[in-house]
Image (cartoon, rainbow, N blue to C red):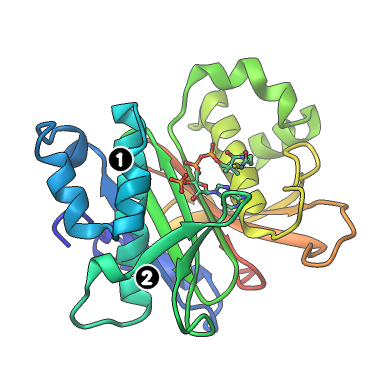
Amino acid sequence: MAFTQAVFEECRPSWQSSFSPQARLRLGAVPLSVLADCPDLELPEVARQYLSANELEHWAGFSRKKRCVEWLGGRLAAKWACAKFLNKGTVHWQDLVIRNEEDGRPYLNTEAPTMAPFISISHSGPLAAAMAANFPCGLDIQLPNAKIHTVKKCFTSPEEESLMKDFLPESFTETERLTMLWAAKEAVRKMVRVSPLLGLLEIRLIAGHGGCGVPEEPLKLTCVSGREQDGCPPAITVLCFFADNLAWAMGCLQNISQG
Ligand SMILES: CC(C)(COP(=O)(O)OP(=O)(O)OC[C@H]1O[C@@H](n2cnc3c(N)ncnc32)[C@H](O)[C@@H]1OP(=O)(O)O)[C@@H](O)C(=O)NCCC(=O)NCCS
């Protein structure tokens, strides 16, 4: 697919090594500028090439160009990740249909649901990205923005801020530390299938191990939720790093090695 780049698989082939061998994961990403820079008349043509009739109808309902581009980018990235996961030779993109459950969670609509990967989608700043995996997964990307300081009480505590300071090298700014923690908690929310979704303050950071927050040496953050509900594991670990000025957080349930 011309619009997607397997950013980590091609540029950083080792990214999967932090997950346990049972995990099968594929990660796709679409630089949104390639869609945003399309002349207005060409964008529907691109959409028609990749989207099913229902997806196209949904897409045509967005009024803001930013949302059109983000949603389409997320779909393209998710379709790419699913095609790779399913090891499809020739891909009919319009047949790989991504839908959202009532609560917004994306899934691959297929006649063989047992073969279908779990998927997670995120978009921020210049990129849309999606992950397909054989376990429930969560992906979040976040462009750092100073506004995060004004909302930090809504998602973090002074204890967590101090933990992040301990876990990351001094070269990380406070904005970057907060952004990484935010992305980690959003990835956890997307991964854990409970209703209602876990709240950001309900998710508590308790440990960090592994690397220094770069793609080659990601930081592994472990959180607990305290919610006792089916589908809510006692502890959840996500892989976090900064790449190209975006905070990345990703995980799939049960499967990040603790090394
Ligand atoms: C979705 C949410 C968890 C994270 O969103 P975010 O960090 O702001 O934005 P991101 O770009 O990283 O993620 C958006 C993607 O998350 C996915 N998503 C939405 N709801 C989700 C859920 N309940 N669980 C997992 N993934 C979800 C979607 O694929 C969405 O992309 P799409 O709309 O293009 O399909 C957050 O927006 C949220 O808490 N929403 C509240 C639930 C809600 O309002 N759902 C909508 C009901 S109609």
Q: Could you tell me if residue 210 is visible in this image?
A: no
Q: Which corner quadrant holds the C terminus?
A: bottom right
Amino acid at the residue labelled 2: Cys
Q: Is residue 179 left or right of residue 236?
A: left
- Choose mark 2 or mark 1, whichever is in front: 1
User: What residue appears at the point 21 percent right and 49 percent down from the top-left corner?
Assistant: 47
Task: Residue 217: give x, y in percent of width and height.
Answer: 47, 57
Q: Which corner quadrant holds the N terminus?
A: bottom left
Task: Residue 61: give x, y in percent of width and height.
Answer: 36, 37
Which numbered dot is residue 82?
A: 2
Kind of element beneath mark 2: helix
Q: Is residue 87 left or right of residue 223?
A: left
Task: Residue 130: give x, y in percent of width and height.
Answer: 41, 56
Which numbered dot is residue 60?
A: 1
Residue 226, compared with residue 34, is above or below; it is: below
Residue 60 in which image quadrant: top left
Determine if the C-beta at disc 2 is less than 8 A from ligand 1: no
User: What residue appears at the point 81 percent right and 42 percent down from the top-left corner?
Assistant: 202
Q: Is residue 17 left or right of residue 137?
A: left
User: What residue appears at the point 79 percent right and 62 percent down from the top-left corner?
Assistant: 232
Residue 4 in which image quadrant: bottom left
Task: Residue 73: give x, y in percent of width and height.
Answer: 30, 47
Residue 25, compared with residue 31, is above or below; it is: below
- Marks 2/1: CA–CA distance: 23 Å
Amino acid at the residue labelled 1: Ala
User: What residue appears at the point 82 percent right and 63 percent down from the top-left corner?
Assistant: 234
Q: Badge 1, how many Cα within 10 Å: few under 14, some, many 20+?
A: few
